[in-house]
Image (cartoon, rainbow, N blue to C red):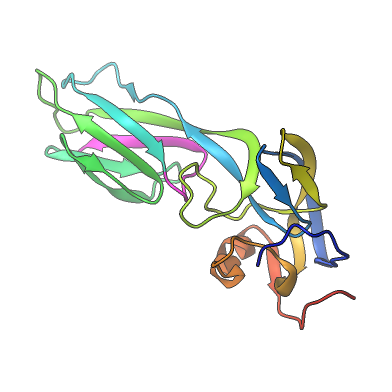
Amino acid sequence: MATNVSEVRNVLLGGWVTAKANVIAAGQNLLKGTVLSEIKSAAAAAADAGNTGDGTVGSISVGPLVKKGVYQLICNGSGFNVLSPEGDACGVAVLDEAFTSRELNLTVAAGAAAFVAGDFFTITVSGTGKHKMVAADAVDGTGTAEQVLMLDVDASEADVPSKGWESGEFDAALLIVPEGESIAAYRDQMRVKSMIQIETTGGNY
């Protein structure tokens, strides 16, 4: 569902309600009820000072479901286990091959000295403070539902300060995600953050 026509929309139904200031990134004209996610970026990989191998990690980019925090790349003897900030496995990066995942993308390049088990790198992912409409295939880390926009915001020309709900009960029929996507696909993500989708007949009332 997508529109840029302002109208009365009783998106918030109640529940335990919390909200937080945000900034809507330029280039968007969004309505109250838009599901938001913060734009994220990854820093350069930092090699542990005790590494035996002298290879590098490059071509780093974030996937739609990247998390803020420190990712670890730990050598298992033949490649590198990629772990999320919570310690969950994202996959194994093979030397000199592109590693891709829904969280982080990168390439570990071999150097003159071979890596050994236990060598590791860290990659810190941070939020930019700017928010966009959530999108399942985002390439800037905005694939996880994190807020619901509290009011209409026209940020077509420049960044605009705003506010978003971070918890509460919401009319699922009035939540806005990109055209072609279903709000139901974000139900579990939102529930974990105490943003509960309530099924109603929807509409203005």
Residue 76 seen in the current view: no
Residue 171 in picture, x, y percent from top left? 76, 72
Nearer to the camera, 151 or 82: 151
Q: Is residue 23 left or right of residue 87?
A: right
Residue 81 in picture, x, y percent from top left? 26, 42
Q: Going 13% across and 29% down the picture, which residue do you hit?
A: 116
Residue 87 in picture, x, y percent from top left? 40, 46
Q: Going 71% across and 65% down the picture, which residue do you hit?
A: 175
Instruction: Specify the quadrant that holds the N terminus.
Output: bottom right
Q: Relative to 31, is 197 above or below? A: below
Residue 38 seen in the current view: yes
Q: Could you tell me how many numbered marks the image carries?
A: 0
Q: Is residue 139 left or right of residue 109?
A: right
Q: Is residue 123 left or right of residue 175?
A: left
Q: Going 40% across and 44% down the picture, which residue do you hit?
A: 84
Residue 126 in picture, x, y percent from top left? 53, 32
In reply to whether residue 79 is colored magenta, the answer given is no
In reply to whether residue 74 is colored magenta, the answer given is yes
Instruction: Specify the quadrant that holds the C terminus.
Output: bottom right
Magenta stretch in the rendered image: 63-76
Q: Relative to 64, is 167 above or below? A: below
Res 172 → quadrant = bottom right
Q: Is residue 159 left or right of residue 126?
A: right
Res 106 → quadrant = top left
